[in-house]
Image (tube, helix red, strand yellow):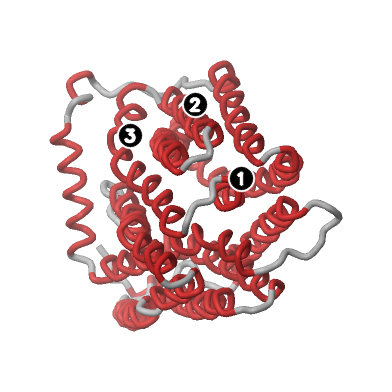
Amino acid sequence: MYGLYVVRDVGLNPLQLVLLGTGLEVAMFIAEIPTGIVADAYSRRLSVVIGLVITAVGWLMMAAVPTFAFVLAGQIVWGVGATFGSGAREAWLADEIGEAAAAPIYARERQFWLVGHLIGTPLSVALGLISVRLAIGGAAIVHIVAALVLLVAMTERHWRPAPRGSRRAWHHMGDTLRTGARAVRISPVLLGIFATAFFFGVAGEGLDRLWPLWLIEGFAFPAMGGLGDVGWFGVIQVGSIVGSMAGVWLAARFTRLDSAVSIARTLVTITALLILAALAFALSGSFWVALIALWATDSLREGAVPLRIAWVNRGLDPASRATVLSIFGQADALGQFGGGPALGIVATIRSVRAALVGVALVLAPTLPVYRVLARREGRIELDRPPAGDLPPD
């Protein structure tokens, strides 16, 4: 309902839509490390609860006053709240039940997240038929209730706070960051993957912020029993969720996750199809073609996510693994707030269609990068002796 709200009720232009995402990503980029201190030095449980409450406040701000300033402020608050929970949940679970037992639960958590979306979509449509602002406010109330439940139900038996002297050890955090950055700098493969993450961030920000405007302004929604655009946005969401599930399953099904070459080749195929789907969405003159193309872009983007993470994870030093993965996330965020506004300017000065074509063009440089990395990884795998041929200690 958020996309419908900012386009139809708040009446934002393309540049303003992209700037909302910029505010969110900048807030997350800046707040990620400071909020991590709360989880590491004071309490993972407290960090999760605080994150839920702050996120709810951000959504209430967006729903309270339908103006650009209030929605932007709500996005920034939402971004800060998201960083409190980011990483704290995973760390809390590993502390409580152990790393080995937690590993399969992370995958199941993703499944529950998608099921939650499926359940939430008809509820948000029902509230949206009364008021789209009510649907956004309802989501905020759900988060507040969750925070209150976790205050009672969430245990924290095995976590121990950091020593008092290390709670203000900013120099230690700086050392860790430099170690992770050096691991990226000396690895051509990681540098290449991070470059592609930047381009995916630029393209994703443009697509995420502009697709509701393109559908609303570019097409007439078919009749749907009086549900109108609210009902259609619910259908679009359900289709995106189902497509995302299929995309993740297919990407994993046809890729050898233990082979970097296989991952790279699959990413070449996914990215090429994603470029075609983005172009079809931008250039379509038919609502149904645009809808199918939008669902295709969502499923392809979601299918690429676990492959890119699995690729980055290969061969990392455990001591700097989390830092390197954080830098990977920051590369995507940098693309979103560093390049996303340019697409918003194109949409404002020229047209939304032109900006969406730009989304596809931004992804094009990732194809040769993936091909070069695939060849490099292929040489590495050929040079690596089979396990049975390793010399004795």
Which labelled disc corresponds to residue 113? Answer: 1
Lower sequence index among marks 1 and 3: 3
- The x, y position of residue 324, in whole percent, is 29, 53
On screen, residue 155 versus residue 233, left or right, reads: left
- Secondary structure category for the residue under label 2: helix
Q: Is residue 246 placed above or below 228 in the rendered structure?
A: below
- The x, y position of residue 218, in whole percent, is 61, 69
Cα separation between marks 1 and 3: 23 Å
Is residue 98 in sight in this rendering?
Answer: no
- Secondary structure category for the residue under label 1: helix
On screen, residue 168 versus residue 46, left or right, reads: left
Q: For the residue carrying disc 3, how many other residues have a C-alpha within 10 Å: few (<14), some (14-19), or many (20+)?
A: some
Residue named by callout 2 = 53
Q: Amino acid at mark 3?
A: Gly
Write the residue at 79% across / 51% down.
227
Write the residue at 41% across / 78% down.
361
Residue named by callout 3 = 36
Nearer to us in this view, 185 or 22: 22
